[in-house]
Image (tube, rainbow, N blue to C red):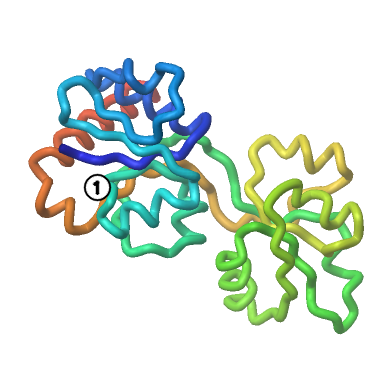
Amino acid sequence: MITAALAKGRLADQTIEILEACGVDCAVLTEKTRKLVLTEPSGALRFIFVKPADVPVYVENGIADVGVCGSDTILEEDRKIYELLDLGLGKCRLCIAGYPDSEKKRGGAALRVATKYENITREYYHNKGENVEIIKLNGSVELGPVMGLSDVILDIVESGGTLRENGLTVLHEICPVSARLVVNKVSLKTKSDEIKPLAEKIKRVIENTK
């Protein structure tokens, strides 16, 4: 049996569509239930539903053999897991955003960055040799610059609509983001006969939908 960790929400729904295209019976996953552990009829796949940030944790510790999460989560968590496939889902960008002159008004003070990505922010500005004050926010980070809590934000940007509606703009693009199929390093060796064929099917489905 392969145990797969899925992030709750839209990404899980999109992943289920791919699995169904691979011939996996996902009927149990579409039923209304509060259960967090579900097994498909053949018993070959077991699914656990967790918060996005927890997917790499479950995979690294071997509770889940594989998982699906965004590359932003992988960067932030920095876990010892292996990226097997880029699923091409949830495409967006990880960006620094703020008002056009946000980075010019500091004087000698440290740049204040509002974000939920503390580790990525720290690493990004460390590599630039800049000192910053990181302000951890878990939602509506755009409010940081709007209300004067921060100078800029570091967040994922999809269409940029929320930024524009609040007078903000992308100042720097850090990297593209998309969903990845990740795997526990030990599982890749001990369950390769189960994991690799499934990964190949997923790869073919993705290629056929491009």
Residue for point 11% across, 46% down:
192
Residue for point 38% across, 41% down:
68
Asked if residue 178 is positioned above or below residue 131 in the image, the reply reads above
Asked if residue 136 is positioned above or below residue 33 in the image, the reply reads below
**Helix or strand or loop: what does disc 1 sit on?**
loop
Q: Is residue 107 at least partly visible in the picture?
A: yes
- Residue 123, percent across and down? 56, 72
- Residue 109, percent across and down? 85, 81
Residue for point 48% across, 33% down:
11
Q: Quadrant of residue 127?
A: bottom right
Q: Is residue 105 left or right of residue 204?
A: right
The residue carrying mark 1 is 65
Question: Which residue ends up furthest to the front in the rendered image?
Answer: 34
Q: Judge by depth and name the residue closer to the eye, 50 or 166.
A: 50
Q: Quadrant of residue 203?
A: top left
Figure quadrant of the C terminus: top left
- Crowd tier of the residue under label 1, counting other residues whose Cα lies within 10 Å: few below 14, some 14–19, many 20 or above: many
Q: Is residue 172 at least partly visible in the picture?
A: no
Report the number of numbered marks.
1
Figure quadrant of the N terminus: top left
Q: Amino acid at mark 1?
A: Asp
